[in-house]
Amino acid sequence: MPIDAATALAAEPRTGEIAWTPKDVQLYHLGIGAGIPATDPGELRYTLESRLHVLPSFATVAGGGSPGVISGLSMPGVDVDLARVLHGGQTLEVHRPIPAAGRARTVSRVTAVYDKGKAAVLVVRTDVGDADGPLWSSDAQIFVRGEGGWGGDRGPTAALEPPTGEPDRVVERPIREDQALLYRLCGDWNPLHADPEFAKLAGFERPILHGLCTYGMTLKAIVDTLLEGDVTRVRAYSTRFAGVVFPGETLRIRMWRRDSSVRVAVSAIMGVPPLERSREWGRGDAPVLLDTIVEHS
């Protein structure tokens, strides 16, 4: 069996060093759609080095790539085909604001391996800190198709109750045709997001957008819409990736206020022209992010 759960769970934590500069932060922000309109003061917080604020979801690419996923796929006891791998979910806890430039130490380990029958799920925990103490902690849920069925723990199955009533805010964010090509420059080089032939091998009609790009776009929309553009108010952010997004589509982000948190539901709708594309691909208001909560001050 390509995944040996006992070996993966018993493996020593993997440590490393990461570093980033304002240029890395600016590239990430551009990769999730910041900078439109280019002279908008709210957008300049994300794009101009003299005013730079760091969106907390930058943690998912700091140092290049997605450390949790990369670490999980290279852990002892894990040997899987990349074409079978999807990012199933992501949680992030922010211990203090992320600086625009920094150097930090990472500690990653597999904390759970679940047997879902026709798939396996790895949960990889990454803790990051610098000389001043902890910066952030994250959990990446890695979904591996075709690797379940060994009789292991199925793990938690209860989904959150969906938000009720009309959302407090609804915003739409278009995704450029080249969005995945730009976002992958942050370090996630999985060909699923760029190579049409590889995408077909993975079961998709064409390359899909990175789930973490959708994750970042959604958090930016919430910060800009409900948190007065203040990135330091974000305390934690969790989601489950429930569907794919194709470049050229539009994200529809629904937000429900809940005291010190925001419940969110995100779906993908067709870009222009919507009617023709919906008929061609059979996609309407397709769910993308579920069980999504942003905790804030």
Image (tube, rainbow, N blue to C red):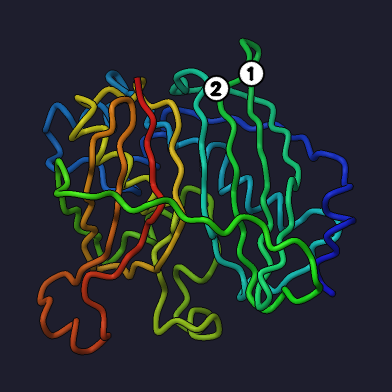
Q: Where is residue 240 in the image (x, y as percent from the top left)?
A: 46, 55
In the figure, 8 relative to 204: above or below?
above
- Nearer to the camera, 184 or 68: 68
> Eyeballing the image, is 237 above or below 129?
below
- Relative horizontal placement of residue 184, taking residue 287 as reference (left or right): right
Height in image: 107 above or below 163?
above
Q: Are marks 2 and 1 in contact (CB under 8 Å)?
A: yes
User: Closer to the camera, 194 or 288?
Assistant: 288
182 relative to 224 in the view: left or right:
right
Residue lying furthest top: 132
Residue at x 58%, y 38% (from the top left corner): 138
Q: Quadrant of the N terminus?
A: bottom right
Rendered residue at 52%/54% (across/down): 89
Who is closer to the viewer here, 289 or 281? 289
Q: Which of 12 and 117 is in front in this view?
A: 117
Instruction: State the SS at label 1.
Output: strand
Where residue 39 sits in the image (x, y, percent)?
A: 12, 33
Determine the residue positioned at 70% across, 74% down: 81
x, y percent for residue 18: 64, 32
How many circles with numbers are drawn on the protein? Answer: 2
Q: Name the residue under label 2.
A: 102
Disc nearest the viewer among 2 and 1: 1
Quadrant where the image shows the C terminus: top left
**To which quarter of the image does residue 255 belong?**
top left
Amino acid at pointer 1: Asp
Distance of label 2 from label 1 (alpha carbons) = 8 Å
Numbered label attached to residue 130? 1
**Coordinates of residue 281 in the picture (x, y in percent):** 27, 85
Which residue sits at x=19%, y=24%? Answer: 228
